[in-house]
Image (cartoon, rainbow, N blue to C red):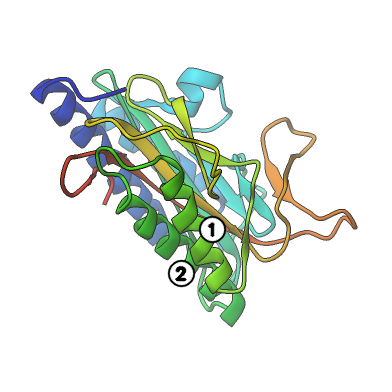
Amino acid sequence: MSIQNEKDLQGILKAGKFVAKVRELLKLLAKPGVSTLELDNVAKLEFEKAGAFSAPKFDYKFPGFTCISTNFEIAHGIPKKETILKNGDLVNIDVSAKLDGYYADTGISFVVGNANETLHKLCEAAIEGTMRATKQAFTGNYLRNIGREIHSTAVENGFTVIKNLAGHGTGKKLHEEPQVLVYEEKRDQRKLGNGLVLAIESFISTGSQTAYEEEDGWTLVASNRRGELSYVAQCEHTVIVQNGKPIIATL
């Protein structure tokens, strides 16, 4: 969607503030010995208190209030009581909500407890890539420049990107046009309109460039042609395109 009035602006900002709050709460609670279902149950209570709907559950009947992925899972991980977090686990928490008719989407990857150097660097690169990309979300800029920044960040840090996953428009539905690639498609001549709401997200990988869906029909993993799995880190923010400095609704 594109922001048309003050009601739209405040609606996106309110939804963004809510999902950011839940994201940070779950990250804080993600300790060794805690199950991903326990984290999701905390999110459930927050949704109920705020009168918000879980966007993946509401729009797609996802079997959880949040997507919580661990280790070689990239995204859309199903919260489970059997998935107990351990020291050194790579975790991704993705929170999307519909609140008062407006959608916002955010996510973060991090390591539980002590991180090995590669996973720490991977998570930092994902954050850096997304933040660099958000600076490109200004009126009249080329859409492809967002993906250029994410891909450049990955390469500069010795990583690559998952090319068949992307960010997206959002606002009135969880997923809207345009698709926001994590690399630059130089043939794409589209420009960003003022007020456009985007979910900008990086998918930075230790090797593979392709995501595959697991047998559960939801969870995504990354592997190369030899079947070797890669770690992937994500960072996602809901951003409003502006004439000047873009507005990040999910900080």
Task: Name the N-terminal-most of marks 1 and 2.
Answer: 2
Secondary-structure class at tag 2: helix
Residue type, mark 2 in image:
Glu
Residue type, mark 1 in image:
His
Quadrant of image for the N terminus = top left
Question: Which of the two residues, 165 or 94, is positioned nearer the viewer here?
Answer: 165
Whether residue 113 can be seen here = yes
Residue at the spot of label 2: 124
Secondary-structure class at tag 1: helix
Disc 1 crowd rating (10 Å Cα; few below 14, some 14-19, many 20+) is many
Q: Position of residue 221 (x, y in %)?
A: 71, 48
Residue displayed at 53% across by 79% down: 114
Residue 161 left/right relative to 107 = right
Q: Position of residue 109 (x, y in %)?
A: 49, 58
In this rendering, the label closer to the viewer, 1 or 2: 1
Q: Is residue 93 above or below residue 97?
A: below
Q: Is residue 229 above or below residue 120?
A: above
Question: Which of the two residues, 150 or 62, is positioned nearer the viewer here?
Answer: 150
Residue displayed at 40% across by 30% down: 169
User: Please, which residue is most extreme toward the left here?
Assistant: 6
Residue 119 left/right relative to 216 = left
Q: Is residue 212 above or below residue 218?
A: below
Q: Quadrant of residue 195?
A: top left
Residue at the spot of label 1: 151
Q: CA distance from mark 1 to mark 2?
A: 14 Å
Residue 237 left/right relative to 7 = right
Q: Quadrant of residue 100?
A: top left
Residue displayed at 65% across by 60% down: 71
Residue displayed at 42% across by 32% down: 190
